[in-house]
Image (tube, grey):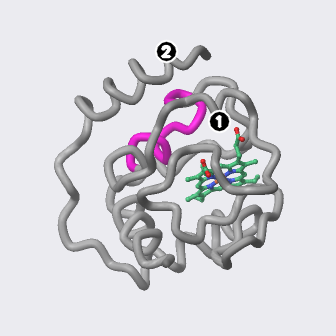
Amino acid sequence: MTRTQGAVLAGMLALLALPPAQAQDKAAGQAVFKAQCSICHSTEPEHNMAGPTLYDVVGRRAGHVAGFAYSDANRNSGIVWSVDTLDLYLTSPKGVVPHNAMTYGGVKDASKRADLIAYLTTLR
Ligand code: HEC
């Protein structure tokens, strides 16, 4: 993907942003993280595993953790991770960032996803 396509995609993501889900439960989100993400992602700074650390992920540009070998698709996506972009990405990682290297199908349940993202916002 080119930078321009990435910027266009980021704009589309902003427009598509869904209204925030209600009653997110961070503890339930942590349980989802442990069950579905922790095999590949750490929550500690500078600790990359099969996936990049998710410490401080909210507010960070996609593909910018030092020392992690991202796919070009992710690095050049132009996405900034926010509650809204994470919601779209975690619904369908390959749908939102085609050819990205995360071998994970997504969290289809909207309320689980909201809990998970509420937990991700605490990682700082
Ligand atoms: C099988 C391993 C694996 C699992 C399971 C997995 N991921 Fe990933 N994740 C990756 C890899 C690898 C990347 C880097 C993708 C790339 O470079 O294209 C990634 C990238 C990401 C990114 C982008 C980070 C950045 O710095 O741009 C986020 C956010 C993310 N994953 C969240 C999650 C969450 C939340 C879960 C659980 C619901 C999850 N991942 C499950 C392997 C995984």
Place of residue 81 in the rendered image (x, y in percent of width and height, measured from the top left): 44, 50
- Badge 1 vs badge 2, beta-carbon distance below 8 Å: no
Q: Which residues are magenta?
A: 87-96
- Residue type of the residue flagged with mark 2: Gln
- Beta carbon at label 1 within 8 Å of ligand 1: yes
What residue appears at the point 43 percent right and 78 percent down from the top-left corner?
Answer: 122
The relative height of residue 33 versus residue 19 in the rendered view (above or below) is below
Q: Helix or strand or loop: what does disc 1 sit on? A: helix
Q: Residues within 10 Å of mark 2 (few under 14, many from 20)?
A: few
Nearer the N terminus, badge 1 or badge 2? 2
Quadrant of the frame with the N terminus: top right
What residue appears at the point 77 percent right and 72 percent down from the top-left corner?
Answer: 47
Q: Which mark is residue 75?
A: 1
The residue labelled by disc 2 is 5
- Left or right of 67 on screen, residue 111: left
The relative height of residue 74 versus residue 116 in the rendered view (above or below) is above
Place of residue 114 in the rendered image (x, y in percent of width and height, measured from the top left): 34, 62
What residue appears at the point 75 percent right and 41 percent down from the top-left corner?
Answer: 70
Q: Residues within 10 Å of mark 1 (few under 14, many from 20)?
A: some
Place of residue 102 in the rendered image (x, y in percent of width and height, measured from the top left): 71, 43
Q: Real-space Cα distance between discs 1 and 2?
A: 13 Å
- Left or right of 17 on screen, residue 5: right
